[in-house]
Image (tube, rainbow, N blue to C red):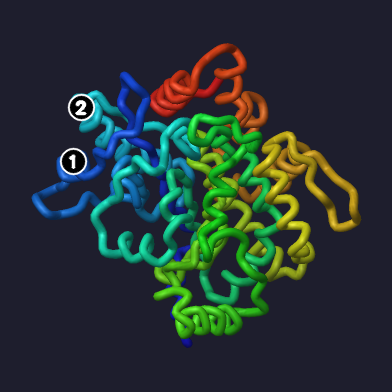
Amino acid sequence: MAIDFNPSPRRSLGVEVELGIVDRATGELVPASTEVLEALEPEPGVEHPKAKHELFLSTIEIITGVCMTAREAYEDLSATVAEVQAELEPRGLTLMGGGVHPFADPKTLVRSPSERYDQLVERIQWPAFRLQIHGVHFHVGVQSAESAIQIMNHLLRYLPHFVALSAASPFWEGQETGLASVRTKVFEVMPTAGLPSFFRDWAAFEKFIETMVHTNSIASVREIWWDLRPHVMYGTLEFRMCDGMATLREVVSLAALAQCLVDYLDEALQSGTAPDEPEGWVVRENKWRAARWGLDADLVQPDGSTVPIKYEIEDLIQLLLPTAQKLGCADELTAIREILDHGASYQRQRRVVESGGSLRDVVTQLVTEFRTDETG
């Protein structure tokens, strides 16, 4: 099966942010996305170009256009969020970041009316019923299918870093999970989610998709939901491993990290200076450690030693700083240090409870952080 990959301008950037709609008074999720999205239509029956439905009506997805810098992505997202908030506020509603709502019951959520979603839930059943989760996706443009596969293989080394920095879901159905990112484990239950396979080349990827379609495992390449995947229509590598984050400032800092890593690895592969591809068992173990312990994780090295993930993140910022300066996102990349200083969202949420607050107070903090774009 030949799969056309549409090249993108180097190093184009797109961002998708899933957000919960909550009642300002109770902190509970509210299935209001259709009402709000209809109010945002530029004309009746014409969908807003940057605000979309998701699986459940208590979620709105905000997307950017094709951007070239993290700053441009931030301004794009901020403008659409302002439009959405203007429709929510008079209704007593607001937006909430984070990877999951801390006390919602997935069984109570109302599904968006969509034939595609109906078919997905019918086929997948119980795992799909539990998807009370929010994520952030980054699209970084690449110029060829072969480059996309080779860069993806090398990017897996850094997947745990994104999981730990974005971790924002320590609570599930009103309970402390002990995980920094329970969203990661909830989504992994989906049949084509989780870690991607290593592919020798684009032809091997095409063969895989052909087999999956032929065996009725998927209807199309769109139903591959890996943590990293080539997006053939956009001509990008899509990063899908991140929890929904509490602020847009955090979102664009990781967008800058994604953009810089793709550019750095592409150039390193072309010059023959790229590090070795990571071993699959190391990636799997370190992803688990990042989901469990977040920024307190020690990452396993191929030689059997371990290194604190915070050290690796700081080293990565330093390594990528020249790339970030070239791409115009040095401020956004170095803002990752604010997450290291103030704590990731999972840590900030736990502090609320440890200081005597309730999970409703956690929602209040998530709402406030998203509205003010401040965490410290």
Residue 203, position in %: x, y? Answer: 58, 84
Classify 205 as above or below 272. below
Instruction: Answer with left or right where residue 275 lies relative to residue 205.
Output: right
Q: Nearer the viewer, residue 70 or 328?
A: 70
Q: Is there a contact, CB below 8 Å, between mark 2 and mark 1?
A: yes
Helix, strand or loop under label 1: helix
Which numbered marker is on residue 35? 1
**Rendered-image quadrant of the C terminus:** top right
Q: Check disc 1: other Cα within 10 Å, few if <14, some if 14-19, many if 20+.
A: few
Which numbered marker is on residue 91? 2
Classify 341 as above or below 237. above
Which residue is rendered at x = 53% and y = 74% of the image? Answer: 144
Instruction: Answer with left or right where residue 4 lies relative to residue 333.
Output: left
The amino acid beneath tag 2 is: Arg
Furthest toward the top, the residue is 356
Helix, strand or loop under label 2: helix
Which residue is rendered at x = 55% and y = 18% of the image? Answer: 352
The numbered mark, 2 or 1, whose residue comes first in the sequence reads 1
* Residue 10 seen in this snapshot: no
Which residue is rendered at x = 68% and y = 52% of the image? Answer: 158
